[in-house]
Each structure stands twice: as C-alpha cells, then as structure tokens.
Image (cartoon, helix red, strand yellow):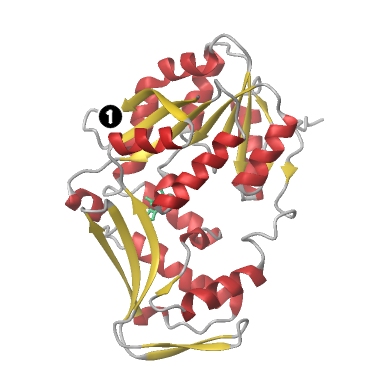
Amino acid sequence: MELTPTVAPMIDLSRQEDGTNSTETFAKVVAEGLSQEPKSLPSRYFYDAAGSRLFQDIMALPEYYLTRCEFKVLTENRQEMAKQFAENSFFHLIDLGAGDAMKTKILLRELNEQKSAFDYVPVDISGDAMRQLSNSLQQEMPSVDVQAVVGEYFPALEWLQENKSERKVVLFLGSNIGNFKADESKHFLQRICSNLSPGDKLLMGIDLRKDPDTILSAYNDASGVTAEFNLNLLRRINRELGGNFEVEQFRHYPIYNPHEGVMRSFLVSKKEQDVYIRDTGQTFHFDAWESIHTENSHKYSLQQVSELGKACGFSVETVFQDDACRFADVLFTVG
Ligand code: AVJ
C-alpha cells in the first residue's frame, strides 16, 4: 500500500479579492493602460504560466546577478539570520511571494538544523506554486510545519493577524519591493507594519545601486529572454482577452536612470499600427515608435533603505550583503 503524504490544507483567500486574477479586471486594467497618454501596463500581469517560466529562465541568466547574489547572501549568513529570527521562542515565518521558495529553503534547512520552534507560512497568488511547495517541503523537510496561504499580500496579512497569534518574521525577498513606486513602497511597508506587533521582524531583499552598465545588462540580456518576458504581456493579452497584437512588431527597450535609481522597461511599436482587443471592444492606435511602459525596478542605497524603513515604523537590526555590495537582505524590527 502506498502512503499518501498528509499535507496541511491550504488557505485560499484568492476568491475573496475582486483581484488581479479575473479576466474582467485584466481587461479593465489593459483598457485603462492603453488609453493613457503615454501608454502603460502594470508589471504584475507578467506572471501567467508562460511568464513565470520565463522569469525562472531570467533568474538563471549570466547577466541577472540579483538571484545569485541573494542566494549567496542567504547562504553565507544563514546561521546568523536563523539565530536572529529564533530568539529562543516560537515564531511564524511568513514568506510573501514565496513561489518555489528556492532561496527560503536555505533558511528553512538552517532553522530545522538549529531545532528552532517555528511554523512556515508561504503566501503566493499562485495556487499551483503553493501546492507544489507544500508537497516538496513534506518530502524534503517533513518536520517543518507548513501552512500555505493562496492570495494577495494584504488579505493574507490580515488573515495572519487574526489567525496566527505568535511572534512573526516576514520575508519579502528577491527585490520585489523594486517594482513599487516610491509612494507605493512606503504604503506597502506601512501596511505590513500595521499588521505586525512590536518586536516582529521583516527580512527584505533589495537590489542596490551600482554601475549602470551592470544593471542595464541584467534587464537586456544577450540571449533575449527578458525581451520575451516583456513581450509575453502582449501575448497574454492575445490569449486571454482576444487581442490581435502582432508581437514581432514591438520591441523590448529597457533603460536605467542613475539619477533616480530606476530601471524602466518599455515595449516600443516598430510601426504605425492598430490593435483590436475583443474583450475590451476597443481598437488602440500606436504611432510609429510609440511606447508602452511596462515595468519599474527601483535600486536603492542602504541609506535610502534605512530611511524608508524608519518612515514606516521599522528600525534596521542587521544589514546582510555580498562582498561586491550588489545586493542586500536587510533585517528590520518593528518599533
Ligand atoms: C521579480 C521584480 C525582482 O525587477 O528584477 C526581471 C522582475 N523584470 N527582469 C526585477 C524582472 C525583468 C524582477 N523582480
């Protein structure tokens, strides 16, 4: 007889949200973005199944230093991090945007070895990813107590506030904060803080300011994977909303502004053209060389990170960095 591993049931909050996964919302957002002057589309729509696969490929690119750097920072500092999380008392380890938790597993293994008392709460909008993660952890680290939550960050944090009463350590890895505009990242961190208690912690991954050429290459790789990732947004509109984008008639154009520390990505129309989208019932006109802004990736100095944290109710406990100072994982405490 085969043993079926028992995996804790997942909490699914994704349907409570009028959220980003419904086709109508997507159609509305696309119609708004393409009617604007200048045109734009939000980067959170990159990650359908095809886009998530392309992002996996991006993380393996020689030019995309972010993932490797953070992997190194976590590996080299795992003992110290685990010790600072544990503080000899039980805690909930909450992983916002956990995905496959490739990097978090470094910390989970260490916490497990140190016999820390904790449970692991991965949060992600992808139900598939959370099912796979629950199963793989059941295999790899059966002694770790896992409670996956499927949903957006804020409904998940509110659910946690009501249902998980012990001390909390929140992980927000991968420089995902970079996609937010300055005011949005403040708002985001303030909301995290308002769902935490004094003494709770936040470990946030941040891509640091560095040579502009290094940054630009990471978003303009020689093999064109990032271009495909960006263009997939148009393919997704074709697939899900009945659009008729001729994807070859657009090109990926990334540019880094060292003054603001912002990497911006665009899709540029190579010719004058009209695009019809069935689900919005509209035709969108593109002038030759007109662009759609698709993503911001903010780069921070350590000074800015610490000021951002302070403005949101956090103080810096420890800054963990690689020797080349390319990427930092900053441990904050509430209060
Ligand atoms: C997942 C937001 C951290 O901005 O570096 C990678 C996404 N975009 N290449 C980033 C991304 C283009 C990535 N984040």
- Reply above or below: 45 against 270: above
> With 311 as the anchor, is 62 left or right in this view?
left
Task: Measuring from the top left, give residue 189's x and y in whole percent.
Answer: 50, 40
- Reply above or below: 292 against 201: below
Look at the numbered disc 1 and say if its residue's Cβ is closer than 8 Å to ligand 1.
Answer: no
Q: Which residue is mark 1?
A: 322
> With 283 as the anchor, is 251 left or right in this view?
left
Amino acid under label 1? Asp
Q: Residue at x 25, y 43 (%)?
A: 209
Q: Residue at x 64, y 43 (%)?
A: 130
Task: Measuring from the top left, give residue 10's x and y in whole percent.
Answer: 73, 40
Q: Secondary structure at mark 1?
A: loop
Name of the residue lying farthest toward the top:
88
Task: Measuring from the top left, give residue 68's x and y in whole percent.
Answer: 33, 38
Task: Measuring from the top left, give residue 215's x and y in whole percent.
Answer: 24, 50
Quick one: 47 or 308, which is closer to the camera?
308
Q: How many marks?
A: 1
